[in-house]
Amino acid sequence: MTALHLVEWRMHIDADSPQEAAQKAWSYMRRQGSTANVFDVYSDGGNVERVDLQALIEDEQTEPSQEEIKLEN
């Protein structure tokens, strides 16, 4: 079952206007090699979880694949 979540990504940006700040943030997020990968995710019940997508990807890469496990046995 799906649920509604509020997802936030925050950073401090020097800018002359709110629009310029938003444009800079969007640019930083979309940049190749961006480290904009940590999000605070709020559930419908008000719980918050910090999710670091880069850490999740790195953890998946360090765990042996099913093929690697079969080769070891």
Image (tube, rainbow, N blue to C red):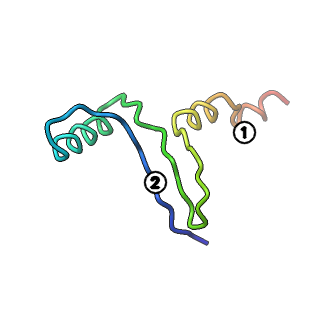
Is mark 1 in CB contact (under 8 Å) with mark 2? no
Quadrant where the C terminus sits is: top right
Image point 19% across, 46% down: which residue? Answer: 18
**Residue at the far bottom in the pictured view:** 1
Front residue of 27 and 56:
27
Q: Find numbered disc 1 in the image and state the secondary structure of the residue it sits on.
A: helix
Which residue has dot 2 on it?
7
Which residue type carries mark 1? Gln
**Relative to residue 13, is residue 56 drawn left or right?**
right
As drawn, the residue found furthest toward the left would be 16
The residue to which callout 1 is attached is 66
Q: Which image quadrant is residue 28 in?
A: top left
**Residue 37 picture location, percent across and down:** 45, 38
The amino acid pointed to by label 2 is Val
Label 1: few (<14), some or many (≥20) within 10 Å? Answer: few
Q: Whole-Å distance between the Cαs marked 1 and 2?
A: 32 Å
Looking at the image, residue 56 sits to the left or right of residue 63; the answer is left
48 or 68, nearer to the observer: 48
Marks 1 and 2, the one that precedes in the sequence: 2
Query: Residue 1: x and y, percent?
Result: 61, 72
Residue shown at the point (52%, 52%) measured from the top left? 41
Determine the residue positioned at 33% across, 34% down: 12
* Relative to 23, 55 lies left or right: right
Q: Is residue 40 above or below residue 38?
A: below
Q: Relative to 42, is 33 above or below?
A: above
On the image, which quarter does residue 72 sit in?
top right
Q: From this viewpoint, which residue is outermost toward the right?
A: 73
Dot 2 crowding, Cα within 10 Å, few <14, some 14–19, many 20+: some
Would residue 55 appear left or right of 12 to someone viewing this image?
A: right
Count of numbered circles on the image: 2
